[in-house]
Image (cartoon, helix red, strand yellow):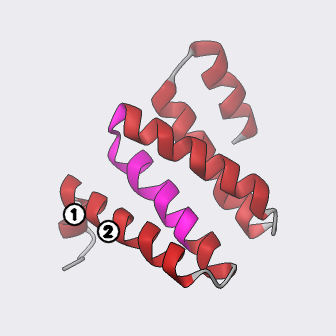
Amino acid sequence: YERLLRLTDTHQDRMMRGYALYGLGHVYREQGRREAAWACYDEARLLGEETQEPFVLFEPRLGLAMLSLAEDNLPEADRHGQIAWQQARGTGNSRQEGWP
């Protein structure tokens, strides 16, 4: 993901940068590097809002929800989870994944 992130800088590809950031956020979260994960997810979230790419809208919010849950911040986890759910429903991904 770090290599992809460098490539997106070279080619100025905002959508792919969002993909790289949320992927790197997942890696950091699994490694316990919460602050680094939070920063990646937050930047990816902003890029998702800018590009309106469905997975770059959904995945960072899901990551932020998981981080908030790990920190026992249930209101924040719920907020990010609800936004992720609404974004998935709005893009049609919810029906493909079997969501209500």
Secondary structure at badge 2 equals helix
Q: Could you tell me if the residues under marks 2 and 1 are in contact, i.e. CB atoms within 8 Å?
A: yes
* Residue 7 on image: x %, y %: 66, 23
**Badge number at residue 15:** none
Counting labels gives 2
Residue span colored magenta? 51-65
* Neighbourhood count class around disc 1 (C-alpha, 10 Å): few under 14, some 14–19, many 20 upward: some
Q: CA distance from mark 2 to mark 1?
A: 6 Å
- The residue pinned by badge 1 equals 89
Image quadrant where residue 35 sits = bottom right
Task: From the viewer's side, name the closer residue of 15 and 81.
Answer: 81
* Residue 55 on image: x %, y %: 39, 50
* Residue 12 on image: x %, y %: 56, 16
Task: From the viewer's side, name the closer residue of 90 and 72.
Answer: 72
Secondary structure at badge 1 equals helix
Residue type, numbered disc 2: Trp
Magenta stretch holds residue 30: no
User: Would residue 22 be seen by someone viewing this image from the given angle?
Assistant: no
Residue at coordinates 44% horizontally, 78% vertically from top-left? 78
**Badge number at residue 85:** 2
Residue at coordinates 81% horizontally, 66% vertically from top-left? 31
